[in-house]
Amino acid sequence: MAISERTKFQLHFHEYKIVVYSGFNYENIMYEGNTDSNKRIKLLFNEVTQHYHVIAIMTRAMAKRYVCEVCNKCCKYGVVHTC
């Protein structure tokens, strides 16, 4: 069984949790690394070009005011959010 490229990246960057989205929606997670790190590398996968793009500012990419990094849910304000 071959190890996927995402898993290889996760093993190499073990101090980060790699999260790959398949679209501009917080629910479209296609890969989430299995690590407890608070540091994240967020990527957007383009299926047409088969390339990954770095998401620098999650709230802008998802057009939301607040995105919870723990449960990947959005809400209007972080102070009212509960996981």
Image: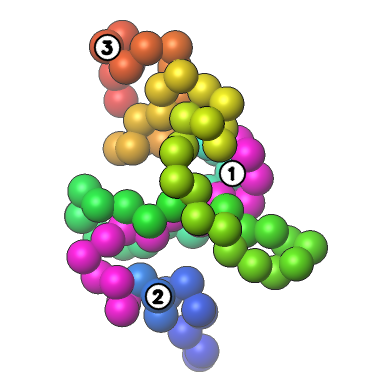
Q: Outermost residue toward the right?
A: 48
Q: Which kind of residue does numbered mark 2 sit on?
A: Phe
Sequence-wise first label, 1 or 3: 1
Which residue carries the number 1 mark? 28
Say which quarter of the image contains residue 68. top left
Eye-nearest disc, 1 or 3: 3
Decide if residue 15 is on the left or right side of residue 56: left
Question: What quarter of the picture does the C terminus occupy?
Answer: top left
Number of dots carrying numbers: 3
Give yes or no for residue 12 being in the magenta stretch: yes
Helix, strand or loop under label 1: loop
Crowding at dot 1, Cα within 10 Å, few <14 / some 14-19 / many 20+, comes out as few
Q: CA distance from mark 2 to mark 1?
A: 20 Å
Q: Which kind of residue does numbered mark 1 sit on?
A: Asn
Q: Which kind of residue does numbered mark 3 sit on?
A: Val
**In the image, is residue 50 above or below residue 37?**
below
**What residue is shown at x 35% (from left), y 71% (from top)?**
10
As rendered, which of 55 and 83 lies closer to the eye? 55
As rendered, which of 68 and 61 lies closer to the eye? 61
Which residue carries the number 2 mark? 9
**What residue is shown at x 51% (from left), y 79% (from top)?**
4
**In the image, is residue 13 above or below residue 78?**
below
Helix, strand or loop under label 2: helix
Q: Which residues are magenta?
A: 11-25
Crowding at dot 2, Cα within 10 Å, few <14 / some 14-19 / many 20+, comes out as some
**What residue is shown at x 73% (from left), y 61% (from top)?**
47
Crowding at dot 3, Cα within 10 Å, few <14 / some 14-19 / many 20+, comes out as few
Decide if residue 50 is on the left or right side of residue 38: right
Which residue carries the number 3 mark? 79
Sequence-wise first label, 2 or 1: 2
Sequence-wise first label, 3 or 2: 2
Q: Report if residue 12 is visible in the image.
A: yes
